[in-house]
Image: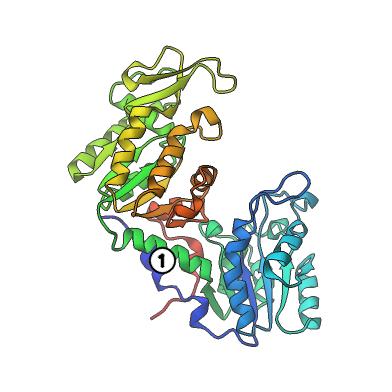
Amino acid sequence: MLEVAGIELMQKVKTIRDIDVAGKRVLIRVDFNVPMDREFNISDDTRIREALPTINYCIDHQAKNIILVSHLGRPSGKNAELSLKHIIKRLERLLGRSVVFADDIDSAKSIQATLKNNAIILLENIRFYKGEEQNDDKLSKELASLCDVYVNDAFGTSHRAHASTHGTAKYTQEKVAGLLLKKEIDSFAKAFSNPLKPVLLIIGGSKVSSKLALLNNILGLVDKIIIGGAMSNTFLQALGNDMQKSLVEKDLITQAKAILDHAKEKGVKIYLPVDVVSTDSLQSPSEIKISPVQDVPSNFMAVDVGPASTKLFNQVIRDSQTIVWNGPLGVYEMTQFSRGTFSVAHSIADTYAFSLIGGGDTADAVDKAGERDNMSFISTGGGASLELLEGKVLPAFEVLDKRN
């Protein structure tokens, strides 16, 4: 049986709707880790938009002030290019009101003491502080001193026990989930606690090693699994196919075979590619061929699922009522190797199934396929959603208040 401890715990967490924020200082851990170009133009503001309902809820319910805490990138100390100053204009435009920037925690305290009620403060990149990723107690207490209510609305970092996602909550009287976190909770619960059947898992990406725990954990619930991407090469090699120069984790072939055997015992049908698109070079391809998996050309590497596989997978998708997708099925970033992944995105969009899309590359692929608005829910957390599917209890949820 699927280990759903993480999802069960998530469902017990109190949300901001369960408490009164009127007259209180509210710290919201948001995820404003948005992509920007060299001129600091934001290319995708989805993460900022997803945080707006929680921020506006606090405004509408008369919070004394709201302080927003986020990271941006992976800085090593202070880095002007990764300053959250660059997102102030976009945030103000989306909120329709001014936001005050605080360079550090002391500045935030001074601003809190002088601004009128309902003011919004954005704290500088929390990863500029050395203690953030170490979940430092001193930093956690300093952040907690800024608020009466702690709200975590950053699912994408909820698998990290950092000061702003874990430690701060331990020193705050009220600590709850935001509205975005509530959406994530509801969507994962819908997909796994009481799903419409048959349930299909589509799993892709480059390495079996990163998805082994997921596959072993989820076999007890799903009815069907489609395996694509470079990770399918290891499974195909385990079945006796010569994948030539394709990425194969040879040390995991035995484990891949064990997963196939275990799935058969459980009555779970696993679908692997029956043909592949392969090339002589990923960096500068001069030849691209389509072949059955049993006949990959010598010195070629598989980089996408082939047309027969796509047709097979699309039929499996059409026959499913709940679909969970984590990981692209090919090198979708390159146009000539994107057809398999994009076809799957189109096929899911055309169904009436409940579709839960893992964050990260999968969300990006769905976006590039033009199907973002046609999915039931796209998670904002790639690593977080992966760990949840592995059956782990995410650290950020452990420290939030629970309903009796």
Q: Indicate the quadrant containing the C terminus: top left, top right, bottom left or bottom right.
A: bottom left
Q: Residue at x 51, y 48 (%)?
A: 363
Q: Residue 217: where, in percent of width, then height?
A: 32, 50
**Front position in the image: 135 or 67:** 67
In the structure shown, which secondary structural element does the residue marked by tag 1 occupy?
helix
- Answer with left or right where residue 224 lies relative to residue 360: left
* Above/below status of 297 relative to 310: above
Residue at the extreme top of the image, as rendered: 298
Q: Residue at x 35, y 37 (%)?
A: 227
The crowding category of the residue bearing disc 1, from other C-alpha atoms within 10 Å (few below 14, some 14 to 19, many at least 20), is some
For the point 52% across and 60% down, the residue is: 155
- In the rendered view, would you say 404 is above or below 240? below
Residue 43 lies, in percent from the top left, at 67, 49
Can residue 88 be seen at all in this image of the molecule? yes
Is residue 383 positioned above or below 51 on the image? Answer: above
**Res. 255 in view:** no
**349 vs 391, nearest the viewer:** 349
- The image position of residue 52, as x and y in percent, is 61, 68
Q: How is the image coloured?
A: rainbow
The spot of residue 118 in percent (x, y) is 70, 81
Tell me which corner region of the image, top left, top right, bottom left or bottom right, holds residue 175: bottom right
What residue is pinned by disc 1?
186
Q: Three-letter amino acid code at disc 1?
A: Asp
In the orientation shown, which residue stands out farthest toward the front?
Answer: 350
Q: Is residue 124 left or right of residue 148?
A: right
